[in-house]
Amino acid sequence: MPEELRPRERLREVGPGALSLAELLAIILRIGSRQETALELAHRILLDPRGLRFLAEATFDELCQIKGIGLAKAAQIKAALELGKRLACLEPDLKPAIHTPEEASNLVMEEMCYLDREYFRVVLLNTKNRVLVVETVSIGSLNASLVHPREVFKRAIQKSAAAIILVHNHPSGDPAPSPEDLEVTQRLCEAGRVVGIEVLDHIIIGDHVFTSLRAKGLI
């Protein structure tokens, strides 16, 4: 692999925030095998529909059952995830802030671009645009998800969110908004104005690409 494409070198040059989830996982794994690089191994692991959630929920023994993952790699993965959990429990100011569509898409891209059904999620933000939590609102069919304003704003109100970002994926890989996407967005923006929680954007995730309805002037 050319040096400029290697995850560790890219992290040094552009910083960890610019790396994909697979690249970050490859750095944790350190090495691959004779059959595949660490990056290829990371991509294969993340093909699981649950993505990063799979790594968080899998037991140590379950990780060891993955081809290419031994005791050392399983321990490295579990240790890194535990550090992340402990960091999440620290002060809110340490949580990531979202200011651009790219930052919003990077938050969910690697997990959601592999899903085989439409998942509709909501990123809850505080007054400083820092992420409070990412909530799954609905899981739909291959081409549609049912979304009700009550479910979208219920958790936002409970968490005292100042604003939200809507996110859903298109299993087809094409992030172009459908008429239904635009209709749902308009309905949720109106509901947000009523309850005093602004809808900052609606991000549609495709196959490692995304569309921001805010950037397109559709919000």
Image (cartoon, rainbow, N blue to C red):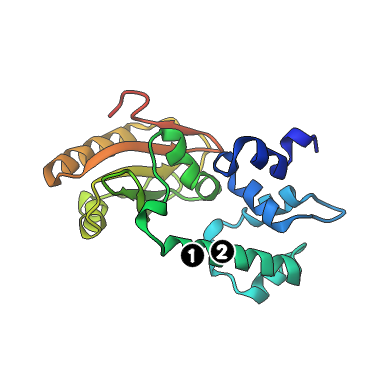
Give the percent coordinates (x, y) of residue 32: 79, 55
Does residue 131 sit above or below 3 in this rendering? below
Image coordinates for residue 12, horizontal then vertical, percent: 66, 40
Q: Tell me which residue sits at (33%, 29%) in the image.
A: 214
Q: Is residue 137 visible?
A: no
Query: Residue 97, position in %: x, y?
Result: 39, 44
Label 2 crowd (10 A; few <14 / some 14-19 / many >=20): some
Q: Tell me: residue 57, above or below residue 208.
A: below
Question: What is the residue that sits farthest to the left in this orientation?
Answer: 194
Q: Quadrant of the C terminus?
A: top left
In the rendered image, which quarter is residue 178 located in?
top left
Within-10-Å neighbours for mark 1: few <14, some 14–19, many 20+: few
In x, y percent, where is residue 91? 37, 59
Query: Would you say 94 lies left or right of 163 here?
Result: right
Disc ID at residue 85: 1
Q: Residue at x 42, y 40 (%)?
A: 104
**Looking at this view, is 43 or 12 the one in front?**
12
Q: Amino acid at mark 1?
A: Lys
Say what secondary structure mark 2 lies in.
helix
Q: Quadrant of the N terminus?
A: top right
- Closer-to-camera residue (4/152): 4
Residue lying furthest top: 217
**Relative to residue 154, is residue 17 drawn left or right?**
right
Q: Amino acid at mark 2?
A: Leu
Badges 1 and 2: C-beta atoms under 8 Å apart?
yes
Give the CA distance from mark 1 to mark 2: 6 Å
Q: Is residue 167 left or right of residue 5?
A: left
Instruction: Tell me: 153 left or right of 181.
Output: left
Q: Which residue is mark 2?
A: 81
